[in-house]
Amino acid sequence: MKSSHRLSAGTVVMLTLPPMLWAGNAVVGRLMVGQIAPMALSFCRWFFALLALLPLTGSTLWRSRALLRGHWKVLARQGFLGVACYNSIQYVALHSTTPLKVSLITSAAPVFVTLLGAVLFGEAIGMAAWGGSVLSVAGVAVVVTEGHLQRLAGLHLARGDLMMLGAVFLWALYTWDLRRNPLSLPRLSVLTAQIAWGVLFIAPLAGYERWVQGQYTHWSEPVVLSIAYVSLLASVVAYACWGTAVARVGAQIPSYFGNLAPLFAALLAYLFLGERIAAYHVIGAVLIFAGIHVALRGRASASVPALPEKQA
């Protein structure tokens, strides 16, 4: 069915909820520092998300088991990049950076995808996409240096910011992998298979974190509620809303709504963490969003894939 570009009230809600829930995920990750170790949080998030998805997708996966076996390497790689690496790194990064900076760096992901396609896969992109990339990269530089660009010369950047740059690079690899290795399965079924592989990759890291490094989880009601939030709301509900909205209006309009995540992160971090918004946040955000807008305008002449639904 051809998607419609009309935005009903219900579609607007479905497009607004995911960036708000993903911003909340970053804030929860920051709040849980010292309460639950990052790999433990990542494992619990995706394990319980998997349990929630299996009743919805289990029958399709069982009927498609031959296809899944034939493409197990692809699914394992995508589960490693998009679930295990990206999300786990984000929780580790939040130990040494802020939810707002994480959201701003992540918001530049479309540009990373564009650049990676040109550099590694020889994809032709237009001048508008290159111009947008320059703007967004400049915005990221302003954010990670906190407005002091001279820090780039000495690489005096926060560890968490550098980790998020690496995470976004891995997300771009994941995005291109999805484009180059599509599976003829419903979107939610593919996600379930990727999550299953991601959980397998995260499990030994969570075990190492607990039994070798001695990082314990201090179980409490806030910890349980946080796990429920990131598993059900920031994962299953956000993905379902986003996927439904993309099916209704196509991929380009949702990409603009995705840029609401830093705004929600700023508000939630102010309310729950007492974090202030600095001038460099605003300047970086303007550059990043301007770059994405310019790059998207040039996408018609490029072979750049639309971003998949974020598992942020």
Image (spheres, grey):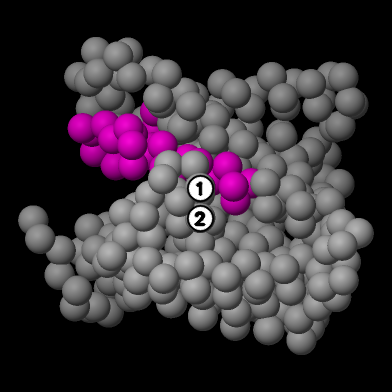
Asked if residue 251 lies left or right of residue 120, the reply is: left
Residue at 76% over, 81% down: 280
Asked if residue 167 lies left or right of residue 1, the reply is: right
Measure the alpha-carbon separation of dots 2 and 1: 6 Å
Dot 2 amino acid type: Leu
Give residue 175's position: percent from left, percent from top: 43, 45
Q: Nearer the viewer, residue 72 or 207?
A: 72
Magenta residues, start to end: 167-193
Q: Nearer the viewer, residue 306 or 10?
A: 306
Q: Is residue 305 magenta?
A: no
Which mark's residue is nearer the viewer, 2 or 1? 1
Q: Secondary structure at mark 1?
A: helix
User: Crowdedness of circle 2 by 10 Å Cα count: few (<14), some, many (20+)?
Assistant: many
Q: Nearer the viewer, residue 181 or 255?
A: 181
Tag shown at residue 119 = 1
Residue 233 can be seen, yes or no: no
